[in-house]
Image (cartoon, helix red, strand yellow):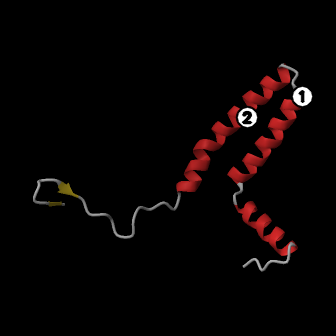
Amino acid sequence: MTVDTVGQVLLAAPDGGPDTSGLAEWLRGFFGPLFLVIVSIVAIFFLFTREITRFAQFIILAIFIGIVFYAPVIIEVMARGIARAMGVDAE
């Protein structure tokens, strides 16, 4: 710790920056169950109010968001596959 001329305390940043190696897993572990609870509550609401069309739309959207949230690597795989199908070098 050093003190500059104004009297403010300056803290040195750690070498290499903060360690964020487990941040994505921690966020998935924290928000994953919360996401599932919210999806369940909304789905049950749509079923009890007999809004089958909105229920189907919501389930499709929730599945897409869940795939992006739980398996983000699939987006990269799909993008490479689409690029290769279009004839673009995907490396």
Q: Residues within 10 Å of mark 2 (few under 14, many from 20)?
A: some
State the residue at coordinates (26%, 63%): 12
Q: Which residue is mark 2?
A: 39
| Circle 1: residue type | Ile
At a point 74% along the width and 61% down the height, the residue shown is 75
Q: Label 2 is placed on what type of residue?
A: Val
In x, y percent, where is residue 79? 77, 66
Residue positioned 71% across, 53% down in the render: 68
Image quadrant containing the N terminus = bottom left
Up the image or down, 30 lies above or below 52; here it is below
Left or right of residue 1, residue 31 in this image: right
Counting residues from the start of the chain, the first of labels 2 and 1 encountered is 2
**Circle 1 is placed at which residue position?**
52
Q: Which residue is most to the top?
A: 49
Q: Nearest to the eye among marks 2 and 1: give it.
A: 1
The residue depicted at 57 percent of the width and 49 percent of the height is 27
**Res. 41 image quadrant:** top right
How many numbered marks, from 0 up? 2
Q: Which mark is residue 12?
A: none
Helix, strand or loop at disc 2?
helix
* Image-quadrant location for residue 55: top right
Q: Which residue is more in the foreground, 89 or 43?
A: 89
Look at the picture and state if 11 lies above or below 32: below
Give the image location of residue 90, x and y in percent: 76, 77
Give the SS element for disc 1.
Answer: helix
Query: Label 2, label 1: how many angstroms apart (C-alpha)?
Result: 15 Å
Q: In the picture shown, does residue 31 fall above or below 39? A: below
